[in-house]
Image: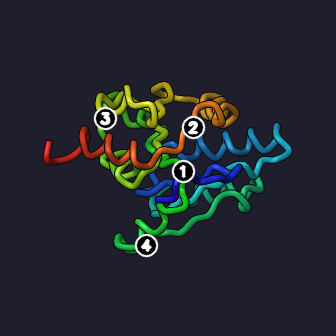
Amino acid sequence: FQESKSSNRYNFIAVGTIAPWHGWDKFLYALDMYKKNNPNYDDFHLKVIGDGPDRMLLEEIVSENDLSDVVTFYGNIPFEDIAMHYQDQHIGLGSLGWERVGVSIASPIKSREYLMNGLNVLYATQDMDLDNFNLAFALPHGCTVDDIYNYLINIKSIYKYSPISCIDFASDNCSFDK
């Protein structure tokens, strides 16, 4: 890992089946809100890896809101290539739409994968393993576009780059060996 990622841009990554429970459409609408209210809206980039029933919806949101310069879709990629995509990222985008499928408490493996790869996590559900870890940021269950937008505008005071802390936390608290 690099000692620090000294950039003014925050790179988010979303990996998985592109489906309603991920709520990634909310994140795109929050990016659009940020773009409309901030002249330097390229402070963020989202890399989306995967495919699924909501991919066309996300691509339409990106197209209709002229976000193609800050959102990149990769589709499905071989599992062994995913680690390479984590290397230049800051924050793993967890599920932001659990309320759409009636889930309020979850322990998604994907959030743990992000942490094991040294990334902070943004998510929106109760997760007893992560709720008290300062590099995993929990939005309210059923979060709104405004909630995500508020996270984006406050990211400089919230985000801390510490990949070793993320890995250590995941190893100590989220391992199948525990």
Residue that lies at the very extreme toward the front in this rendered image: 3
**Drawn side of residue 81 relative to residue 175, left or right:** right
Dot 1 corresponds to which residue? 90
* Residue at the spot 35% in from the left edge and 70% down from the top edge: 79
Dot 2 corresponds to which residue? 159
Residue that lies at the very extreme toward the right in this rendered image: 39
The alpha-carbon separation of the residues under discs 1 and 4 comes to 20 Å
Considering the numbered disc 1 on the image, is that residue within a helix, a strand or a loop?
loop
User: Which of 68/20 is in front?
Assistant: 68
Contact between labelled residues 4 and 1, with CB atoms less than 8 Å apart: no
Judged by depth in the image, the label closer to the viewer, 1 or 4, is: 1
The alpha-carbon separation of the residues under discs 3 and 2 comes to 23 Å
Q: Which mark is drawn over residue 106?
A: 3
Q: Amino acid at mark 4?
A: Ile
Q: Would residue 4 be visible to someone looking at this image?
A: yes
Question: Quick one: label 2 or label 1, which is nearer the N terminus?
Answer: 1
Considering the numbered disc 3 on the image, is that residue within a helix, a strand or a loop?
loop
Give the class, few, some or many, for how many residues have Cα within 10 Å of label 3's Cα (few <14, many ≥20): some
Count all numbered tags in the image, as a single digit.
4
Considering the numbered disc 4 on the image, is that residue within a helix, a strand or a loop?
loop
Contact between labelled residues 4 and 3, with CB atoms less than 8 Å apart: no
* Residue at the spot 44% in from the left edge and 44% down from the top edge: 94
Q: Would residue 20 be visible to someone looking at this image?
A: no
Contact between labelled residues 1 and 3, with CB atoms less than 8 Å apart: no
